[in-house]
Amino acid sequence: MLKNNPRDFIEEEDRQIQEEIWLLGQPKLRDYLHFVREMVIDGDKLDRTQLTDEWRTTNDYYHELEEREAGIADQEECRDLDPTLAPLVEEVVADPRYQSAFAGLPAKFEMVELDRLVIFQPHVTCRFVESLAARLGPDPGPEALFHFCLPLGRPEPTVRIQRVGSDRFLFWSDSSDFRFLEPVLLDPEQVRDYRSAGPVAGIVGLMVGFGSNLLNAVRADKRLILHNGYHRAVALRSLGITHAPCIVQTATRMDELDIAAAKDVVKTPAFYLKAARPPLLKDFFDPRIRKVLKTRRIRKMVEVKFDVQDFHVVD
């Protein structure tokens, strides 16, 4: 359908613009400048020197915080869950997504203090945070809070799929949790309504979908590093909620941290585990650290390609 009204184009353009809260002053400056240039509206026209000065000012502020709040990340307050939530915990533990994601290290359910969670993700999307906060409401009960932080079976965001070649497929979604999951070998009986040109010996599935989507953190050296659930954690804090149900895995050595933590943490563990004052979740609410940027709409895209070779082998 042709659009004749200019307002139609404006509204469509507005839908493509979103606001990101970005935390200045922490590594890496290069990442911030790259994000501004590539994602911020007219970011390539902004003064690079001014951006760097702005970042440097916040970095100096972090040095002040290192003196004023030294060791704050080591004082994370965790509480036991309300005993009435035990059946909900059992439900999560029984779910295949939990069993797959948290099979490697000891894990327990705790009420974690949000402000002191160490963070590695430097930005969140304003509109998503606001929609999550509106969905939960200002005064949730224990069960509502638990389901918000540790959801099972909720509808996932829309996914678009397009075949772009004989061996290539594109998948994309607005969700930052969207990802390639794993390759699997399936029996023919596991696939329904497929009409084959001949008898099927086996099926290779390349699984694309979403992460476990459960609020979780990694405990290491007395600190809790938020691993997944950044938007929900910020939404909770914006509602004045100080503690939230969270799955906590404990890593006691680098090899364990390597399988539980994000790549940014594994690359520079000393920054997150030893710095006197690492970036914390509460920084998203500090006007001297946060900056709201108007960006192009960000989608997550996954490209899947496969290769087939047919040859003879002599026994």
Image (spheres, rainbow, N blue to C red):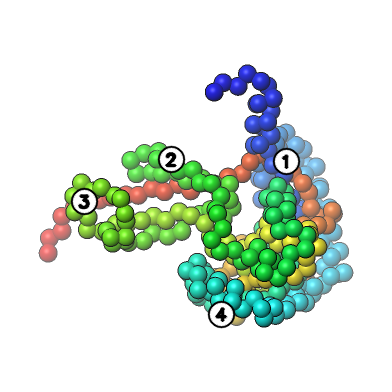
| Alpha-carbon span between mark 1 and mark 3 | 50 Å
Q: Position of residue 100 (x, y in %)?
A: 48, 69
Q: Position of residue 114 (x, y in %)?
A: 74, 67
84 with respect to 254 (left or right) = right
What amino acid is found at the position of numbered circle 3 in the picture? Asp
Circle 3 is placed at which residue position? Answer: 310
Within 10 Å of disc 4 (Cα), the crowding (few <14, some 14-19, many 20+) is: few
- Lower sequence index among marks 1 and 3: 1
Q: Which residue is mark 4?
A: 106
Asked whether 46 or 289 is in front, the reply is 289
- Of pointers 3 and 2, the one earlier in the residue sequence: 2
**Residue found at x 55% / y 76%:** 90
The residue labelled by disc 2 is: 162
Three-letter amino acid code at the position of disc 2: Gln
Residue depicted at x 48% and y 48%? 302
Q: Classify mark 2: helix, strand or loop.
A: strand
Dividing the picture into quarters, in which one does residue 82 lie?
A: bottom right
Kindly report the distance in space between the C-alpha atoms of the residues bearing marks 1 and 2.
29 Å
* Residue toward you, 11 or 275: 11
- 119 above or below 52? below
Farthest residue toward the top? 4
Q: Which structural element holds mark 4? A: loop
Q: Earlier in the sequence, mark 4 or mark 1?
A: 4
Q: Nearer the viewer, mark 1 or mark 2?
A: 2
Determine whether the residue tagged by mark 1 lies in a helix, strand or loop: strand
Q: Residues within 10 Å of mark 1 (few under 14, many from 20)?
A: some
Disc 3/disc 2 C-alpha distance (Å): 26 Å
The picture quadrant where one finds residue 231 is bottom right
Q: Disc 4 versus disc 1: distance between alpha carbons? A: 41 Å
Marks 4 and 3 sit apart, C-alpha to C-alpha, by 44 Å
